[in-house]
Image: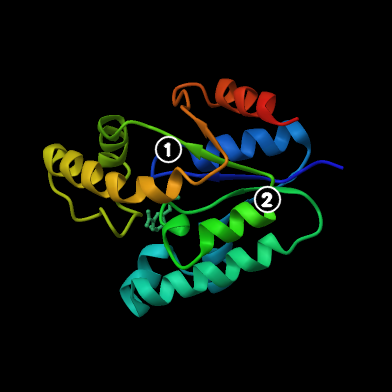
């Protein structure tokens, strides 16, 4: 029987796009944790942060994560950039999923990508300049790295070719 695959990594590291490609190639169900939450509440993540605050979001995120991790049918799951860094989520993900994979991208590359895609991301939506984004991402990623590196595998994705990255990840699965 196929095994599940779970992608972690900072915002903008390609988790959703690459996850979808892996799922398609392996004919597995695909879940994006943020989308699952948005669909359940019919409200964008940014509004959830505004209305109930980050800590309440983290509790919802955890319960949705637990639900998906309990599925019997194998899946590919892309989680949010903060998911591994709250509660015991990273331990739980490693316990339930054979292939937990950290998409490791350099902060400058992330900052450049995120600057044009910040509006839907409440943690960075108010950042005004590329220099400020680079500083924020560098510090934040440094703190989060301790969680991400607990994933069982680490891959440096090719962000201009998600198909190539998906193929590279599929080769790891044996
Ligand atoms: C977050 C990342 C987002 C989303 C929320 C918080 C984070 O997901 O869960 O905005 O704390 O890094 P993506 O990594 O898919 O952008």
Q: Position of residue 97 (x, y in %)?
A: 68, 50
For numbered disc 2, what is the local secondary structure? Answer: loop
- Is 4 or 154 nearer to us in this picture? 154
Q: Is residue 53 above or below residue 17?
A: below
Q: Is residue 17 above or below residue 94?
A: above
Quadrant into which the C terminus falls: top right
Residue in the picture at 56% in, 44% down: 7
Location of mark 1 (residue): 13
Q: Determine which quarter of the picture holds residue 46.
A: bottom left
| Sequence-first tag of 2 and 1 | 1
Task: Say whether residue 95 is left or right of residue 82.
Answer: right
Q: Position of residue 112 (x, y in %)?
A: 26, 33
Residue in the picture at 47% in, 56% down: 84
User: How many circles with numbers are drawn on the protein?
Assistant: 2
Residue in the picture at 44% in, 70% down: 58
For numbered disc 1, what is the local secondary structure? Answer: loop
Q: Residues within 10 Å of mark 2 (few under 14, many from 20)?
A: some
Q: Residues within 10 Å of mark 1 (few under 14, many from 20)?
A: many
Image quadrant, ligand 1 = bottom left
- Is 141 or 39 nearer to us in this picture? 141
Task: Say whether residue 171 is left or right of residue 153.
Answer: right
Asked if residue 13 shows in the view, the reply is yes
- Judged by depth in the image, the label closer to the viewer, 2 or 1, is 2
Q: Position of residue 17 (x, y in %)?
A: 54, 37
Mark number displayed over residue 89: none
Location of mark 2 (residue): 97
Q: Position of residue 50 (x, y in %)?
A: 31, 73
Quadrant into which the N terminus falls: top right
Question: Are the two marked residues, 2 and 1, in contact with CB atoms closer than 8 angstroms?
Answer: no
Q: Is mark 1 within 8 Å of ligand 1?
A: yes
Q: Determine which quarter of the picture holds residue 163.
A: top right
């Amino acid at each position: 029987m196929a095994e599940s695959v779970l992608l972690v990594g900072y915002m903008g590291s390609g988790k959703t796009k690459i996850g979808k490609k892996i799922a398609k190639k392996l004919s597995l169900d695909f879940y994006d944790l943020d989308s699952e939450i948005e669909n359940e509440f019919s409200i964008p993540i940014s509004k959830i942060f505004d209305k109930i605050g980050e800590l309440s979001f983290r509790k919802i995120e955890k319960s949705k994560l637990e639900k998906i991790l309990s599925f019997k049918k194998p899946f590919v799951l892309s989680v949010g950039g903060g998911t591994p860094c709250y509660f015991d989520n990273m331990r739980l993900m490693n316990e339930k999923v054979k292939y937990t994979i950290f998409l490791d991208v350099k902060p400058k590359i992330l900052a450049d990508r995120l600057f044009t895609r910040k509006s839907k991301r409440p943690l960075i939506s108010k950042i005004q300049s590329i220099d400020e984004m680079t500083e924020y991402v560098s510090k934040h990623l440094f703190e989060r790295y301790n969680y991400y590196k607990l994933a069982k595998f680490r891959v440096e994705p090719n962000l201009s070719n998600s198909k190539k990255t998906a193929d590279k990840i599929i080769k790891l699965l044996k």
